[in-house]
Amino acid sequence: MAGIPNFATAPIAGSSVLGSTADTSYTAPTHTVTLVTAASVTVASCVTNSTQLVTVASGGFPAVLPGFQVIGTGITPGTTVLAILGNNLILSLVATAGGTVTLTFAPNGIKIEEIDFAGTGVTVAGVCQLFLYDGTTYHAWFSQLVTVVTPSTTLAPFFQAQYFTNLEIPYGWSLVATSWVANQLLNVVAFGAAY
């Protein structure tokens, strides 16, 4: 792993209710919902001055964390974020030019530590399939069995939490879910952080 997730700084919580159409493909699902994508952040009006310091007038660097890759005019390839303090950011390498530029900050990925499968009504027997999606190909990753539960004042809805130590979503990839049963009343929630 290239960095260490910082859960206290920028938690990721992806949540989605599954679709109304059943989908039983392990290789080419057509009715998926995206829980989370490891995507970049763009910040406009960044001032570089041929040093390691980058500043913005206001608003800081939202959703940017130390360790993120920095891409833009006057930035040496391989440069990462060392530290952020308000409207100031410190680069790992000196900027090669000075000026006002738009910079892109790319995480190495997202580490997911928990996925909750929560019934939102009567659930039916089925499978919730999770995939890692690279933008072209779906990679079947995890199957969660869902049981029949009819919630009432004495019975809580279906709930299952799964914990992971090895689920890292690379930059540009997504975690998606689908159901083998149409109209499954199930909410899928992913918890983790970018690094």
Image (tube, rainbow, N blue to C red):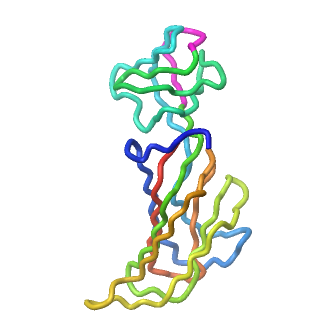
Q: Characterize the magenta stretch by its predominant secondary structure.
A: strand
Residue 177 sits in quarter: bottom right
103 in magenta: yes
Where is residue 47 drawn, in percent x and y?
Answer: 46, 15
Say which residue appears at 60% left-offset and 11% top-offset: 96
Looking at the image, residue 141 lies above or below residue 49: below
Relative horizontal placement of residue 151, taking residue 32 as reference (left or right):
left
Where is residue 162 drawn, in percent x and y?
Answer: 50, 69
Say which residue appears at 54% left-offset and 65% top-offset: 33
* Residue most extreme to the left: 153
Looking at the image, residue 9 lies above or below residue 151: above
Residue 104 sits in quarter: top right
Relative horizontal placement of residue 37, taking residue 46 as reference (left or right):
right
Number of callouts? 0
User: Where is the N terminus found, in terms of image quarters?
Assistant: top right
Say which residue appears at 41% left-offset and 87% top-offset: 122
Nearest the eye: 83 or 126:
83
Looking at the image, residue 50 lies above or below residue 35: above
57 in magenta: no
Bounds of the magenta span? 94-104
Where is residue 194 drawn, in percent x and y?
Answer: 50, 45
Where is residue 134 drawn, in percent x and y?
Answer: 68, 53
Say which residue appears at 46% left-offset and 35% top-offset: 64
Residue 71 sits in quarter: top right
